[in-house]
Amino acid sequence: ARAHRTSRAARGDAHGMGIGAKREGAAVPPPSKRQKGGEASHARGGEDGRAEPTEPVEFTFRGVTFRLGDCIALLPPDEGAEAFIGRIEGMRTPEQAGLPPQPQGEGAGVSADRAVSSQGTEVAEIYVRWFYRPEETHCGRKCFHSDRELFVSDHHDWEHVKSVNYKCNVHTLRQWMALERKPPGDHFTRFDYSARTRTFKPDRVPIYCVCEMPFNPDFFMAECKACHEWYHPQCIGCTVDAVSVKGWKCPECLKEGT
């Protein structure tokens, strides 16, 4: 089975920069003194609402146990497309979903393909809160969006349990930067997005460097020990090695003798 969102996004023009020099474990820059309005307006219409109270709260499917709150990758409707990413916020039995129960018993050949709760009941559907990728929105991917960045949305759908592909993690930005190794299937989020109103929370983001762009963890930045501003080495004509020395100062502070 493949996941089908209630509505697909209009895709914007992607204009993200390539991955630059990066050092794993670099600190997340603190809030800047300068502020810039968020690059908002990411759109997809969708079904809104909450999952009705359901039991059970966990199930095992193809040898993996899934629980409420777990983040998952779901098979997209198109072959070769990137997996949909969502969070499980509810689940229901075939009876609750108005579906016939799956055949059981020896000879049916489906036991490994059934989702079964710890109470032994079958789980047919899961209630998913979708994460959006930047390019799935009408404004497209911006240069400060990371390759692994997702947005938490208010778009929900009931999906068949067989559309689940694998379990993954969606971290906060600070958690993401603290990871020594970033698993290939994992992502991070720093914005909540309303598909209905096309607005972000927060709607303002700090900007850094002479390029005055929001922080992108895919690009290495260094802090000046004098002014405590953060810079991309390439934006100020420096190398990564040059800005990595202890007590490094930006060209402006060196010129002023601070």
Image (cartoon, rainbow, N blue to C red):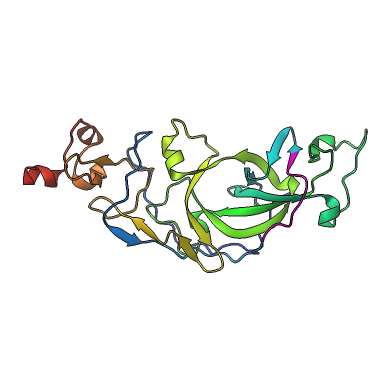
Q: Position of residue 21 (x, y in %)?
A: 32, 38
Q: Residue at x 61, y 49 (%)?
A: 86
Q: Is residue 45 left or right of residue 228?
A: right
Magenta stretch holds residue 15 = no
Residue 24 shown left or right of residue 137 in the figure = left
- Does the magenta segment cover residue 58? yes
Q: Main secondary structure of the magenta part?
A: loop
* For residue 213, above or below residue 162: below
Q: Is residue 232 above or below residue 159?
A: above
Looking at the image, which is closer to me, 41 or 129? 129
Q: Position of residue 126 (x, y in %)?
A: 72, 50
Image quadrant holding the C terminus, namely: top left
The quarter holding residue 180 reads top left
- Relative vertical location of residue 44 with respect to residue 18 in this rendering, above or below: below
Give me the residue at 69% from left, 39% from top: 66
x and y percentages locating residue 6 in the rendered image: 66, 62
**Where's residue 160, x and y in %?**
75, 51
Residue at the outermost bottom position = 197
Q: Is residue 195 left or right of residue 64?
A: left
Question: Magenta segment, which residues?
Answer: 50-59
Q: Could one spot residue 251 in this view of the protein?
A: yes
